Image (tube, grey):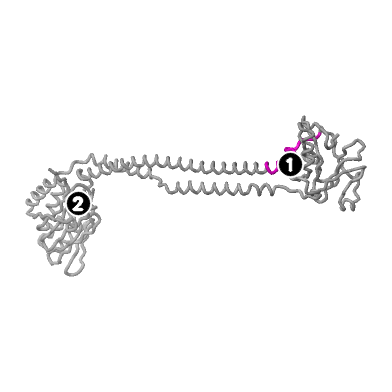
Amino acid sequence: MIAANVRLNIEGKDVVLIRDVIGKAPSEKYTRQNEGSLHIWYEESVLTETRDAHSDTHVYGLWQTLIATGAIDLEEKLQVLYTNGQKNIGYYLYINNGVMQSGSIFNGELHSLPSSALSDELSLDDAKVLSSDERTLKLPAEQLKTQKEILKQAVAKKKSGQQRALMCIVLIIASGMAVDTFLSIQHEKQAKLYSALEHKLNITQDELKSLVKTKRYNIPTQSETLSKLYNVTESLNSESLSANFSLKSNDVVKVYVDNTTFNSARISMLANGDIQTVRVSPDQSVITWVNENEN
Amino acid sequence: MKMKINALPKKVKQYSNIFLLVTLTSIGTGWYVLSNESGRIKPDFSNTNALISKYEAEIHEMSAQPDLPRLNYIWSNIQLIANQYNVKVSSIEKVEDAKFTEDEIPCGQPWFGSLQGTSKNVAAAALEIQKTLPVMFGQAVIDNKVMGLSFAAMGTIEFN
């Protein structure tokens, strides 16, 4: 049978449960502690007295333990826990629209029941009875603590959180620096390799330049153009010619010749597939071809 | 004794500053690493290797070519051939006057000059010269029965 302020054995541990409340603190003397998403309130003086009386046991709150066990049903409006066999003494929990209020049962009566429960005409007969078997209980994650212990724990938790955050930041920065250093080393390695390659390129270029200065390479053969030029100048050896042209490949050559009654046949004879002869005026003809040099 | 059921918001608020700090640190560190990396110039290995391969192929091809004769040898031979055709040879100092550009000279040290004489003879001499010597012809000017023809002789200079 569960009861407050008596030694119980829960999950193999000797514990004492003290009376706590859910909802608003009854007075300023009460200390608050979280259990899951709920708050429980208890008197710090009761806690210290219980600790003194049971120095070798852990102290938890009654409702705290029931919450940790999962015995509370948030769908139920009224839940009761009897602490004697006659079922006329115990505790109740009233839930209305998510607002909770706990209280005590004495002589089969619900004490300090809120007005909404009274208007609903709730009685103990409507209540869900919670199991009083201590074997079904589970221990909360933390014992009840004094305000000083809670503050100390909060400070320690904050410090620990800050330390973890600091470590995390240091780790991120260190990782970033490590990655940057790794990339920098890789880049230096690449730069060294590239420098060697550039050196090889320079040597190759120098060798090529040196060969260009000494080897007979890529000189165009202009024999076809020169032959045409020879044929034209020989055929019209005694004529007045004029021209100004380049012998570079694909350039057009134009040789002008004055027309006479004697040279028209010779001019016409020069024309073949590559050389064109055109009479541009009564006094002048032009002989044209395109240079086709070979390398 | 009333109480509302509180859920996660408080915890989220408690850790939000840490999350914010960690996120900002991560962004800052990431930016630092990426900006440093983007500042590093990536060497173009493939292009340089391709250039080396190209030059090596040209060296291989060029090595198999005959050596250029010395310029004074070319010059004396040009004069020898030109004399046979009664053509005058004269030297041109500037590359522009010979109507060539530096890029047009494919090999060797150039020496610029011109052939002058009757058109037929200059053409015949030019044909003969190019058959035997590394010479490239540039600009021709024919006026009446006379022709001038510029050339670039390509050879080597021997330094003592």
Please tell me which residue lies in front, A6 or B69: A6
The image position of residue A181, as x and y in percent, is: 45, 41
The image position of residue A215, as x and y in percent, is: 20, 43
Q: Amino acid at mark 2?
A: Gln
Q: Numbered disc 1: what chain?
A: A
For the record, the magenta segment spans: A136-152
Q: Mark 1 highlights which residue?
A: A146
The reply, left or right, for residue A157 in relation to residue A146 is: left
Mark 2 lies on a secondary structure that is loop
The image position of residue B147, as x and y in percent, is: 12, 59
Q: Mark 2 highlights which residue?
A: A222
Q: Inspect the magenta stretch and tell me whether residue A147 lies in it.
A: yes
Q: How many marks?
A: 2
What is the CA distance from the residue labelled 1 to the residue labelled 2?
111 Å
Q: Residue at x 38, y 45 (%)?
A: B44
Residue neighbourhood size for the residue with mark 2, other residues' Cα within 10 Å, grouped as few (<14), some (14–19), many (≥20): many
Mark 1 lies on a secondary structure that is loop
The image position of residue B54, as x and y in percent, is: 31, 43
Q: Residue at x 19, y 54 (%)?
A: A225
Q: Inspect the magenta stretch and tell me whether residue A2 lies in it.
A: no
The answer to which of marks 1 and 2 sits earlier in the sequence is 1
